[in-house]
Image (cartoon, grey):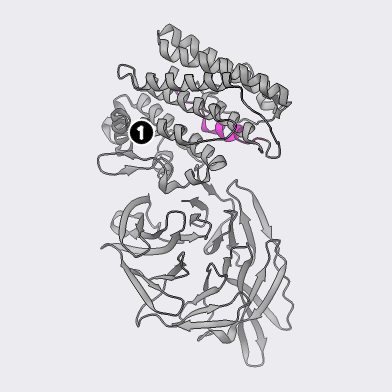
Amino acid sequence: MSSIVTGILSSTVGLLLNEARSSAAAKLRNGDVTDAEIGNIVVSELNDIKTKLDALSRTDLLYSCKLLKEGIAFLNDSLDKSNLKIKVSMSESQEDLGEASGTSASLDETLGLSRSLEDVVVNIKLDEDVKKKFKEAGENASRVFCNQGLSIEDRIFATKLGIISEILQHLESPKMTGCLLFLRDLHNLPAICKRLSVYLKGGFKSRFFNAAKRRENVKSIMRINYVLFQHASKFSRKNSFVLDWPTIELNDRRFNPILHWHKVSKKRFMWDEMRQHPNGLVLDERIIPEYSAVNKDEDIVAVLMNHTNVEAFSRKGERKVVKLPDIIEKNLSNKIIKGLAVDNNNNIYMVTRLQKRTENGLALSYVLYVLDKEYNIKHERRITDIFETIQDDPVRIAMNKDNDIIMIKAHDPYVYICDSDGELKVKFEPKSGFSISSFGISENNEIMMSSSKEVLIYSEKGVLISRIEVPEGHEVCGVAFHSFFCKIIVLTYVDVKSSVFLLCYTAMGERLESTTFFCKKNSRKSLEIKSHPSGRVAIIRKRSIIFI
């Protein structure tokens, strides 16, 4: 069981930690913290909270804190026997503790505390007494939450205690069911829906009537979602898909705290703490979204803006340079990458346009390079003769489940299907007048091609299977298949609203639902949706990536 204990303890501390008041803050900054000290920090925070609650006579919450404290004491004994060493880092930002005092701790603390040793192997079995303490703490927190006489701040705090109890109770084998039940109950509180709605709507009421308290409530809700989503991403892949995350029902729409993170983070007073998307990356280097792909490790492989360099970006924010082959040809004057894709085995397929000087002027040619997952050349093939036209145009590439290469070249009327070595198998022309702007591959290897107003789904043999017409006013930006949900996702832009939408359809093209992704003028530019058969889908822009 690798790094489970370290990751889980870091997450639970991230929900309760109050660096400004914690006597262990200096040790945390130094990074040399043992398992016992981690437990002591949690107990210290519970003691601090206990003092505040005692003054307010919140007996039930006090009891939940007491049970958690006892459970952690037992847990420390188990960890001592395992000789586990936990090292965490922490940001310098400081804020007061959680709902018990009316404010929320910094998201940066959660980011720092979630970075634990990935290579630690822990064999631990919780005693039944420990499980019982955490279970009882969770049950009591649930009773507290149901007390309608308590303030919304106390009920938010009860949710935190309940989630932490659930996490620690299932330390041996992480489960998300109980945590998500607490989260859904929190989302369903009328007061939460009302405060979030007022906050998002803005205006006079949002700025002047209980503004500070409302802002802290919203921040707490978002932070709970952030920590729990990070926990799900580490230990429960099936619960880490954004489209399936618990939503909050507002009067006019559903609010997804992960998918719609930016709607809160962009607000005044929120950016410093919420700049990091819980399921996305902000890139230091600009990329070309059109020449990007998702691999099976959920990394994004993309061509940089110079059209000659390629890098892989992991979900943790790590970057790795993809070393490309040296191209040595006589009279070569220019070479740029014109297309990129990744197959099921993480092999990279790259179309490079070569420009050579000849007696008759400049001559263009296209070469397909296939690199293995270690970026060594497996195969190369000139594919110039495949295309109907030889203009200097981008080549969109995608891979199907059989590792066939599907290519569509701008200003070329045909769709080309080649084997993994670049040998042409089939080519066909879509319906007359259909201008292909983007395309994706379905679970059954069907080719989903989009123009500005519709998506056509073809078989590998070029037979039209079905057609998706997007709503009036929507312009199609891209299409992808989400194999985990078996849904076709169409990315669209509505100019009059300056908004990007995600439209979900069944595999047969029946409309299911739609949601606003984000709102920003000119957001149509350089926007792509990419998918991988493993199930992960990403929205890619020049400086950001969001996984859905």
Q: Mark 1 points at which residue?
A: 187
Determine which quarter of the picture holds residue 38: top right
Q: Report the span colored magenta.
A: 102-116
Determine which quarter of the picture holds residue 327: bottom right
Q: Residue furthest front?
A: 128
Asked whether residue 114 is drawn in magenta, I would say yes
- 171 w.r.t. 251: above or below: above
Q: How many labels does the image show?
A: 1
Residue 201 image offset from top left, x and y in percent: 29, 38
Residue 151 image offset from top left, x and y in percent: 34, 19
Residue 193 image offset from top left, x and y in percent: 30, 33
Q: What element carries label 1?
A: helix
Q: How crowded is mark 1: few (under 14 residues within 10 Å), some or many (20 or more)?
A: many
Front-lying residue, 173 or 494: 173
Q: In this view, does 217 lie to the left or right of 336?
A: left
Residue drawn at point x = 52 percent, y = 23 percent? 16
Front-lying residue, 531 or 102: 531
Residue 370 image offset from top left, x and y in percent: 65, 71
Q: Can residue 132 be seen in this view?
A: yes
Q: Residue furthest bottom?
A: 360
Q: Is residue 518 left or right of residue 425?
A: left
Residue drawn at point x = 61 percent, y = 22 percent? 127
Determine which quarter of the picture holds residue 362: bottom right
Residue drawn at point x = 52 percent, y = 68 percent? 400
Amino acid type of disc 1? His
- 327 w.r.t. 490: above or below: below
Asked whether residue 331 is drawn in magenta, I would say no
Image quarter hosting the N terminus:
top right
